[in-house]
Amino acid sequence: MSGADLLFYAFAAAALLGAVLVVALRNPMYGAISLLGTFLAVAALFLLRHAEFLAIVQIFVYGGGIMVLFLFVIMLVNLHRLRETTKYDRQTPLAAVLGLVLVALFVTVFALASFGPPLARPEAFTAGAQGISGNSQAVAWLLYRDYLLPFEIASIFLLIAMIGAVVLGRRA
């Protein structure tokens, strides 16, 4: 087993542990910190697959922007009232059955799947007619040339959501 394999298993275990802690922890702030750890572990997994652009986007967008939104929500929720509510109200048996079904499904899929040779890097990411080399340049070239309008529309939606969060936060 190589060092890259050990790193993969370590970061995959960290991501799974963080995801379980997000659901299992009672304090929302600790859950948000576990979610941040999960995001960073997934970014490390992207780096191991030589997807540097996706790793940086994972850190900036999810580790930065989405976590700030979650922290706003946590600050707006009345935590004193939250402690009075029960966390799992007669859902434990159903959750256990669904969890076992999902585990059986994953074991079946992985047992029947045949994993071939590792994927080669697509030609679009290695070299192109425009002299593009690397993941970041290829994604940026497509994003700002071919998909500029959807990119700008998404940025306007995010701006509207941010303004709405500020307005809702000021009312409280």
Image (cartoon, rainbow, N blue to C red):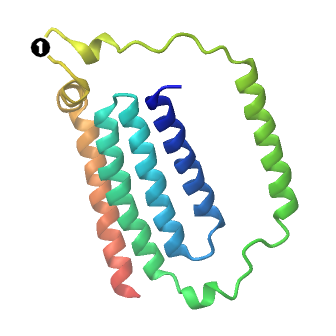
Say few, some or many: other residues with alpha carbon within 10 Å of mark 1 (under 14 / 14 to 19 / 20 or more): few
Foreground of the two, 91 or 156: 91
* Left or right relative to 5: residue 152: left
Q: Residue at left 53%, top 50%?
A: 14
The image quarter containing residue 150 is top left
Name the residue tied to disc 1. Answer: 131
Say what secondary structure mark 1 lies in.
loop
Classify 37 as above or below 32.
above
Spot occupied by residue 51 in the image (x, y as percentages of width and height)? 34, 31
Spot occupied by residue 164 in the image (x, y as percentages of width and height)? 34, 70
* Left or right relative to 126: residue 65: right
Foreground of the two, 166 or 126: 126
Q: Residue at left 40%, top 51%?
A: 40
Q: Quadrant of the C terminus?
A: bottom left
Foreground of the two, 149 or 142: 142
Classify 160 as above or below 126.
below
Classify 78 as above or below 72.
below
Query: Which residue occupies the extreme bottom position in the image?
Result: 80
Q: Residue at left 63%, top 75%?
A: 26
* Left or right relative to 153: residue 83: right
Query: Which residue occupies the extreme left position in the image?
Result: 131
* Left or right relative to 40: residue 96: right
Question: Which three-letter amino acid code belongs to the residue tagged 1?
Answer: Gly
Spot occupied by residue 132 in the image (x, y as percentages of width and height)? 15, 18
Q: Residue at left 82%, top 41%?
A: 101
